[in-house]
Amino acid sequence: MDLPMLKKHLTRYILLFFILSALGLLAWWFFYDPVKSFTVSVPGMDNRKKGMTPQGKPVQIGAEFKFFKTSEDVPGTRWTRFRGPDFDNISKENIRLIDRFGKNGPEILWKISLGEGHAAPAVYNGKVYILDYDEAAKADQLRCLELSSGEELWRRGYRVHLKRNHGLSRTVPAVNEKFVLSIGPKCQVMCLNRVNGDFLWGIDLEKEYKTEIPFWYTGQCPLLDGDTAIIATGGDALLIAVDCLTGKKLWETPNPKGWKMSHSSVMPMMFEGKKMYVYLAIGGACGIAASGPDRGKVLWEMAEFAPSVVAPSPVVLDKGKIFLTAGYGAGSALLQLAVKAGQYSVKVIQKFKPSEGLASEQQTPIFSDGHIFGIQPKDAGGLRNQFVCYNSGDCKKETMSSGKTDRFGLGPYIMADGKFYILNDDGEMTIAKASPSRFTVLSKTRIMEGQDSWGPIAITGGYLLVRDSKQMVCLNIKAQ
């Protein structure tokens, strides 16, 4: 074969090689799945086992402590838990509070920066306790502050990785003379000495009880009943009771139906001489015996009202009635308890959508003197976001509303000294006369230039504590 012919054949072979290679690459590109080896990014699938830090180490609850200064107790200032000492969000202290803000606005005593969230404070004898998340340190921190100055006394916490989820911390600690109890966003329970922050015990609910962390993280506020911690775990147990001094489990309520932890908190109730804990889980509502030989036993349960998302806590009314509500179109239900020969029963006497009666998306309504006060959710029709009052015997019977010009979004509210202190989403506070028949605005002013001002309000000793998503402020509202 001569040289020109050889070059001609070689050119053909090279051209054929490139054509076949191109066809092969095209076929590979068409049939190759580039995400075949990927996994869906969901909690627990990021190469970390339950109860692990970002570095793959177990969460060491209470391992980190910082001391700043000492401060003596100042007796007489107590807002000891979510919804206050009597679980009703009503301050009963005999202290005259302001009716109106002055010309220069509210008297702000101090303010501090917080990690993003909606966690609110508890107060005991001049000390403020608030659960915070330090994003730089990637750690939950239970912080103790001086009520009069806002200066930090100490903080104790533990490293745990969180991703922003429309806020991080969102629970209120429970505190008494000896203990302070918290639940972190990923269900880590921590019990400390109230005065000096010494670590007593901790429980990782996800690790120990297979608790499913709620969407938007934990919203349940812990309950201190004397020296006993009451926690709704979901998972392997419905409720548990723990001795605060030793960390020993006193009892566990079985959870055969697999009800899950909600954002709602456990509320105590007395009915016909029997003390019980009322809880609205994801799955239904129940009453658990709180005392006696049957403590921890399910006395009654109801699944007729079982929203998939629950933030407000049960409202214990009079004469064995309980009001339940939730957002996202769930509406509300009014329950009636009964007992005969030691056997408890429950009946749903009203059930309705948010456009048909009292409902709430986030805050828990207030019951006072036969009436229930609250803020209607955004899907309540013409009453959306208005402050309203309903007869507790008929939660579809409206007696008062704030009107179209006074709407409050998802903001918190509290009753004190015959008045309501109501905060809207954007940090504006309204003082209104507490009346079931008429909404009378006494004063209003902006407290902070923030957003998502949803954390529950605390009032004690003439101090008002409130927060938005990134800061907490303390006001002097004691009347001169």
Image (cartoon, grey):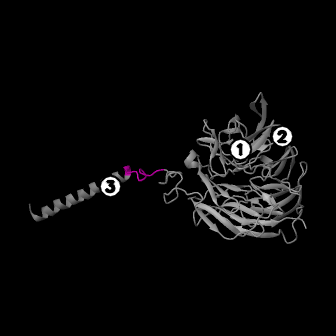
The residue singled out by tag 2 in the image is 318
The residue singled out by tag 1 in the image is 329
SS assignment at label 3: helix
Residue 181 or 368: which is nearer the viewer?
181
Residue 450 percent location from the top left of the image: 72, 65
* Span highlighted in magenta in the image: 30-39
Where, quadrant-wise, is the N terminus in this rendering? bottom left
Query: Distance from label 2 to label 3 (Cα)?
Result: 76 Å
Mark 2 vs 3, N-terminal side: 3
Disc 2 residue type (three-letter)? Asp
Find residue 477 and report its image quarter. Answer: bottom right
Judge left or right: residue 279 versus residue 357: left
The residue singled out by tag 3 in the image is 25
SS assignment at label 2: loop
Q: Is residue 201 visible?
A: yes
Q: How crowded is mark 1: few (under 14 residues within 10 Å), some or many (20 or more)?
A: some
Q: Residue at x 83, y 60 (%)?
A: 430
Q: Can residue 407 be seen in this view?
A: no
